[in-house]
C-alpha cells in the first residue's frame, strides 16, 4: 500500500459521515448516548460469557445497513486494531487453567475468556467506528460540548483530529519529494529517514503556528462553536428508546437460550 493510499484510507471514515441516510440524519447527541450505553452493556458481562454476546451484533449490523457503510472497510479497520486485543488476552489460556461448562461440555476457562475478550473488543470497536462514520469526529466533539464538557477538552480533541491530517499532508509532500529525487531503493536508509522525520517535525510546527495565527485573527477564543444547530426530534427519541429497550432485553433476558429452547421444542 502506497502512502497516498494509506492517507486517503484514513480520511475515508470521515467522508462516510457526510452521507445522507436515516442514521446520518439523527442528532449526534442521541447517537453518542446510544453508543455509550451499548459499550457499557457489552463490557458489563462476566468474562466467561460468550453466547450471550451474540444478540448484540444486531446493533452494528443495523447501523451498517441503514447507514450505508461498506462492510469490508469496517472489517479492515477492526482488523488493524485487533492486535491490541489479541495481545491482551493471549495469556488467558496460560494463566486461567480452570474449566467451565460451555454448551454442555467442559472447556478451558482461559480460552472461553479469551473469546469473550475478542467478542467484546469487536463489538465496542465497531460501535465506536460506526459512530464516527455516521456522525464525524467533529460532530461527536460538538455533541460532547453540548453535554457540558469543558471547552478546553473538546477543543483539544478537535485540534488533535485536525492536526493528524496536517501531519499526514506534510508527510505526503515530503515522501513525494523524496521519491522524485531517488531511484530504486535509494533514499530508504536510516540516515535519510531520520532527516525526513526532523524535517517533518519542523514543517509541521511551522504550519501549525500559521494555522493558529489565522484562527486568532478570526476571533478564536478557546471554544469552537458549531454553525449547525440541531434539535432532538421524534425520530431521534424513537431511535434512543428502541436502542435502550433492545439493550435491556438482551442484558436481562437470555435470548440465545430462549431461541435454543424454541428450536429444540420445534424439533421435538
Image (tube, grey):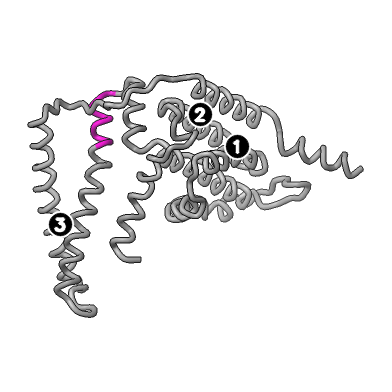
Q: Is residue 101 left or right of 86 when viewed as pictured?
A: right
Label 1 environment density (alpha carbons within 10 Å; few <14, some 14–19, many ≥20): few
- Across and down, in percent, residue 7 comes to 30, 56
Q: Please name whichever residue, 52 or 129, is drawn nearer the observer in this view of the structure.
A: 129
On whether residue 152 falls in the magenta region, the answer is: yes
Callout 2: SS = helix
Q: Is residue 36 left or right of 198 when viewed as pictured?
A: right
Label 3 environment density (alpha carbons within 10 Å; few <14, some 14–19, many ≥20): many
Q: Quadrant of residue 6?
A: bottom left
Q: Measure the alpha-carbon separation of dots 3 and 1.
A: 46 Å
Q: Residue at x 43, y 30 (%)?
A: 32
Q: Measure the alpha-carbon separation of dots 3 and 2.
A: 40 Å
Pointer 3 or 2: first along the chain: 2
Pointer 3 or 1: first along the chain: 1
* Residue 169 visible in the displayed image: yes
* Residue 87 visible in the displayed image: no
Residue that badge 1 annotates: 46
Residue that badge 3 annotates: 200
Q: Measure the alpha-carbon separation of dots 1 and 2.
A: 17 Å
Q: Residue at x 57, y 50 (%)?
A: 114
Q: Nearer the viewer, mark 3 or mark 1?
A: 3
In the depicted structure, whether residue 234 falls above or below residue 121: above
**Which portion, as a residue range, is magenta?**
150-158
Residue that badge 2 annotates: 37
- Across and down, in percent, residue 60 comes to 54, 41
- Which label number is shown at residue 89? none
Q: Is residue 202 left or right of 81 when viewed as pictured?
A: left
- Across and down, in percent, residue 17 comes to 39, 40
Callout 3: SS = helix
- Across and down, in percent, residue 1 comes to 35, 66
Q: Is most of the magenta stretch helix, strand or loop?
A: helix
Amino acid at each position: 500500500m502506497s502512502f497516498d493510499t494509506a492517507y486517503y484510507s484514513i480520511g475515508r471514515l470521515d467522508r462516510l459521515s457526510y452521507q445522507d441516510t436515516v442514521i446520518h440524519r439523527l442528532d449526534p447527541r442521541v447517537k453518542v448516548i446510544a453508543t455509550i450505553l451499548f459499550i457499557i452493556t457489552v463490557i458489563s458481562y462476566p468474562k466467561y460469557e460468550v453466547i450471550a454476546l451474540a444478540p448484540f451484533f444486531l446493533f452494528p449490523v443495523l447501523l451498517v445497513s441503514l447507514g450505508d457503510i461498506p462492510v469490508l472497510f469496517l472489517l479492515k479497520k477492526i482488523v488493524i486494531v485487533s492486535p491490541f486485543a489479541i495481545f491482551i488476552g493471549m495469556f488467558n489460556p496460560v494463566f486461567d487453567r480452570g474449566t467451565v461448562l460451555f454448551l454442555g461440555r467442559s472447556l478451558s476457562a482461559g480460552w472461553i475468556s479469551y473469546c469473550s475478550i475478542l467478542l467484546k473488543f469487536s463489538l465496542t470497536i465497531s460501535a465506536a467506528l460506526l459512530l464516527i462514520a455516521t456522525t464525524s469526529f467533529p460532530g461527536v466533539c460538538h455533541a460532547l460540548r453540548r453535554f457540558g464538557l469543558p471547552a478546553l477538552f473538546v477543543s483539544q480533541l478537535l485540534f488533535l483530529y485536525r492536526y493528524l491530517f496536517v501531519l499526514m499532508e506534510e508527510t505526503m509532500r515530503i515522501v513525494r519529494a523524496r521519491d522524485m529525487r531517488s531511484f530504486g531503493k535509494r533514499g530508504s536508509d536510516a540516515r535519510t529517514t531520520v532527516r525526513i522525520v526532523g524535517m517533518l517535525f519542523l514543517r509541521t510546527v511551522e504550519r501549525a503556528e500559521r494555522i493558529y495565527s489565522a484562527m486568532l485573527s478570526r476571533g478564536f477564543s478557546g471554544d469552537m462553536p458549531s454553525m449547525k444547530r440541531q434539535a432532538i426530534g421524534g425520530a431521534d427519541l424513537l431511535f434512543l428508546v428502541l436502542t435502550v429497550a433492545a439493550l435491556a432485553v438482551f442484558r436481562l433476558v437470555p435470548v440465545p437460550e430462549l431461541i435454543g429452547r424454541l428450536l429444540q421444542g420445534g424439533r421435538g
